[in-house]
Image (tube, rainbow, N blue to C red):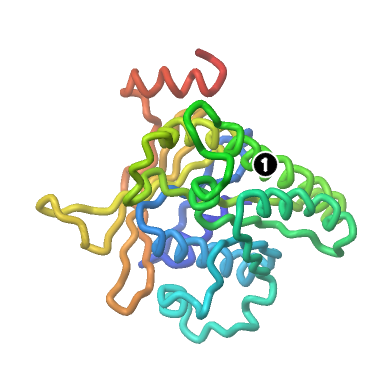
Amino acid sequence: MADILGVVFRRFASGNVTSDVMFPSHVEGNTLLLLGDVNISRSVLFLAAVTAATDLGLKVLFFTQTPFQSLPVSLRASIPGLKLESLKNVKFVYVKSLEDLREDIASLHELASEAASPSSLIIVDSLDHYLHGSRVGPLQDDLSPVAHVAALLHDTAAFLTQILQSRADGQGLCRVMVSFQSEREGSRDSEALAPELLLSVLDRYLQVRCTLEEVKRDGEVGQNEWQVYLSVVCPSQVQQWHMVLQTGGALEFSPVIGGEQQILDQPDESKQENERCGDG
């Protein structure tokens, strides 16, 4: 099964896209979504949830701290005529703290055994908000909160995959999609862990990274355009897309010609990546 974000990109592409988002067979489809703007992050997550539920017929579990008063403008603009019935396969769970999030994720092991059809996609909106709002961190030299929740998500997805495969002729899969702001605006906590340390832990469990880099012109942002990089660490591989927020609020994607490549000319980064792969 192609990565769900790849399905989203093709579904909302500006033209016909024949290529698929493909990664090495050993790479799991768990995706870490890195974004600088929380609103754009949530819009992409919504598109992923609705696409998985409607186009792929999957059950989706969507964890978030903030109750939604209405559907995002970008979602309504991207899918004209979208009705609430289309979201019947998407279950929103409003969780305030990291401790509650971990408890809810852990409980899926018990609930899945009783459910007729377990969730095939678990989404966590703004994991960084949970981590920074936790009573236990993240502080210097304490990576246990992020490691615990990332490992729990990974293990839960593996457990649900086993159940789905036993009920779907071996074809069922459970994915995890997490949004995370690597740099929080206004964050000046001198005791906070450096973003790269948190990301190094998340990379162990979420093997596909999606990075959105806002396009700058004349050194200024605000162009409502982003370069989208889908990447894996081992082996180092990246695929590039272009995303535009249209005037009406719809998100539109287009593949970048030559945007699929092996990264072979970055020795410093390659050394770090090999260490993550266990080769360093």
Q: Residue at x 39, y 52 (%)?
A: 35
| Residue with the most extreme left position | 218
Q: Quadrant of residue 168?
A: bottom right
Q: Nearer the viewer, residue 256 or 133?
A: 133
Quickly name the residue at label 1. 154
Q: Is residue 177 left or right of residue 262?
A: right
Q: Nearer the viewer, residue 92 or 4?
A: 92
Residue 63 to residue 89: above or below: above
Q: Is residue 67 left or right of residue 240?
A: right
Q: Is residue 214 left or right of residue 126?
A: left
Image location of residue 242, percent across then percent down:
33, 55
Q: Residue at x 88, y 55 (%)?
A: 113
Q: Is residue 6 visible?
A: no
Residue 6 to residue 26: above or below: below
Q: Is residue 82 visible?
A: yes
Image location of residue 69, percent across then percent down:
52, 79
Q: Nearer the viewer, residue 246 or 24?
A: 246
Q: Nearer the viewer, residue 166 or 269?
A: 269
Residue 1 to residue 74: above or below: above
Q: Residue at x 81, y 50 (%)?
A: 109
Q: Quadrant of residue 58?
A: bottom right
Image location of residue 86, percent across then percent down:
62, 79
Q: Residue at x 56, y 62 (%)?
A: 65
Instruction: Give the amino acid at mark 1.
Output: His
Q: Secondary structure at mark 1?
A: helix
Q: Quadrant of residue 4?
A: bottom right
Image location of residue 215, percent across then percent down:
24, 53
